[in-house]
């Protein structure tokens, strides 16, 4: 039995709690639960909801509920005082906070998860302003230049409009969203699948430090916990629940981002997706969201703000610059002769990556098309306007 007296609890959570929060005993009990169970454990969630975190721990050994007895078999191996102390010590070392339901900093949006809501959260950084709208922008790790360009534009414009950008800190679309929100001086929040003291992926350690300095890095798993496939999937429900709307920016047919989209649909959160070229496997998942989940077609931050019910789109961060660059791009193309993306970049004087992004936008607008061999050419004006040529 892990000791649950008041003095032990206060000593255990010292340095991890702010003033005016719930009792140290309740916080400590929830920290214990955080170590015992995997994220989203419904049996634990129902037991705590019925008896409270402290009494629920006492019920583990004495409960006659067959479901609880079966769950005890998977909880017991982790029920050692040393494991809990190690998690709490690791949290103190990295400057994390322990946040539990009832605290002023608790994200009440997560309560919509019911029995599968987190029993406790660990946070590096500041609490999110509950009054600010929040949007989850998610997508594939194996992203394209087009996807990252759209993600950055959406995140920057939304952040400039005062929207908190939420994502999972992964490579690809997630990272592009976090970086753009930070560059725009806005707020961004990352949810990790492992402990907040274990930056993952390692290549985003500096990015996560930046997020923690101006926003927040959250995790349901205690410090020291490693990310696993299950924890990534379970983490996605928190991203969906924490947000007022979810947008899939770029995702393949079987992308994990569709798991986040499914959680959003279940929770009744507005769901959108950015369309891509119909020939692009990297956007097949987005097209599934539009078709199977009745998602909103998102082409700009204005579409996302409309999903939130927020009036007036923000002024595009770089509309004039993009217009000038697009003009150079189109000047480098021909309606009769197809040209490779590299050739277009050379002729326009644009960086290859910038040219690829602008070609993607121009294709969405119907101004250019790509041949079967990958060559680009302009589209006749009557076809671009949707009239028969």
Image (cartoon, rainbow, N blue to C red):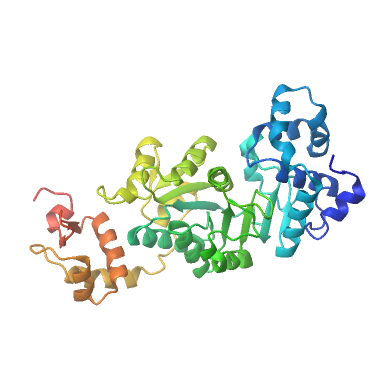
**Residue located 69% across and 25% down the image:** 67
Q: Nearer the viewer, residue 156 or 196?
A: 196
Q: Quadrant of the rendered structure where residue 185 is?
A: bottom right
Count of numbered badges drawn on the protein: 0
Relative to residue 262, is residue 367 drawn left or right?
left
Is residue 60 placed above or below 201 in the rendered structure?
above
Where does the N terminus fall, quadrant-wise?
Answer: top right
Residue 270 seen in the current view: no
Residue at 33% from the left image edge and 45% from the top image edge: 284
| Residue lying at 83% horizontally and 58% vertically, measured from the top left | 14
- Seen at 56% across and 66% down, the residue is 205
Position of residue 85 in the picture relative to residue 257 (left or right): right
Residue 240 percent coordinates (x, y):
54, 45
Q: Residue furthest front?
A: 77
| Residue 248 as seen in the image, left or right of residue 35 | left
Horizontal side, residue 63 vs residue 141: left or right: right
Residue 233 position (above or below residue 326) = above
Q: Nearer the viewer, residue 131 or 186?
A: 186
Q: Residue furthest bottom?
A: 349
Q: Does residue 2 show up?
A: yes
Q: Is residue 322 above or below residue 139?
A: below
Report which quarter residue 189 is drawn in.
Answer: bottom right
Q: Where does residue 136 sit, x and y in percent of width and height?
A: 51, 51
Please state the horizontal and vertical placement of residue 214, each as a whole percent of the image: 61, 66
Residue 19 at x, y percent in the picture = 82, 57
């Amino acid at each position: 039995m892990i000791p649950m007296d008041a003095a032990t609890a206060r000593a255990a959570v010292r340095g991890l709690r702010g003033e005016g929060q719930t009792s140290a005993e309740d916080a400590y009990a929830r920290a214990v639960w955080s170590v015992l169970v995997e994220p989203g454990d419904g049996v634990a969630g129902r037991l705590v909801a019925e008896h409270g975190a402290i009494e629920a721990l006492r019920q583990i050994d004495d409960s006659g509920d067959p479901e609880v007895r079966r769950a005890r078999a998977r909880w017991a191996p982790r029920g050692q005082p040393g494991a809990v102390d190690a998690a709490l010590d690791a949290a103190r070392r990295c400057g994390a906070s322990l946040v539990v339901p009832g605290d002023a900093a608790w994200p009440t949006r997560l309560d919509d998860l019911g029995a599968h809501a987190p029993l406790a959260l660990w946070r590096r950084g500041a609490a999110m302003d509950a009054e600010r709208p929040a949007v989850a922008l998610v997508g594939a790790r194996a992203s394209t230049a087009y996807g990252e360009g759209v993600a950055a534009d959406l995140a920057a414009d939304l952040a400039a409009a005062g929207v908190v950008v939420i994502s999972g800190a992964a490579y690809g679309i997630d990272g592009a969203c976090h970086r753009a929100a930070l560059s725009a001086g806005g707020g961004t929040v990352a949810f990790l699948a492992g402990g907040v003291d274990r930056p993952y992926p390692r290549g985003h350690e500096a990015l996560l430090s930046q997020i923690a300095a101006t926003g927040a890095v959250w995790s349901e798993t205690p410090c020291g916990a490693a990310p696993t496939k299950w924890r990534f999937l379970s983490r996605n429900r928190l991203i969906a629940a924490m947000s007022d709307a979810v947008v899939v920016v770029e995702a393949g047919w079987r992308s994990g981002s569709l798991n986040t989209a499914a959680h959003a649909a279940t929770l009744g959160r507005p769901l959108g997706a950015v369309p891509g070229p119909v020939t692009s496997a990297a956007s097949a998942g987005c097209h599934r969201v539009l078709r199977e989940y009745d998602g909103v077609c998102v082409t700009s931050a204005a579409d996302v703000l409309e999903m939130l019910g927020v009036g007036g789109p923000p002024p595009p961060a770089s509309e004039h610059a993009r217009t000038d660059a697009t003009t150079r791009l189109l000047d480098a193309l021909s309606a009769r002769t197809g040209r490779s993306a590299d050739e277009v970049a050379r002729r326009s004087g644009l960086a290859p990556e910038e040219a690829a992004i602008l070609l993607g936008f121009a294709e969405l607008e119907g101004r250019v098309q790509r041949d079967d061999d990958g060559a680009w050419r302009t589209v006749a004006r009557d076809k671009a306007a949707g009239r028969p040529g």
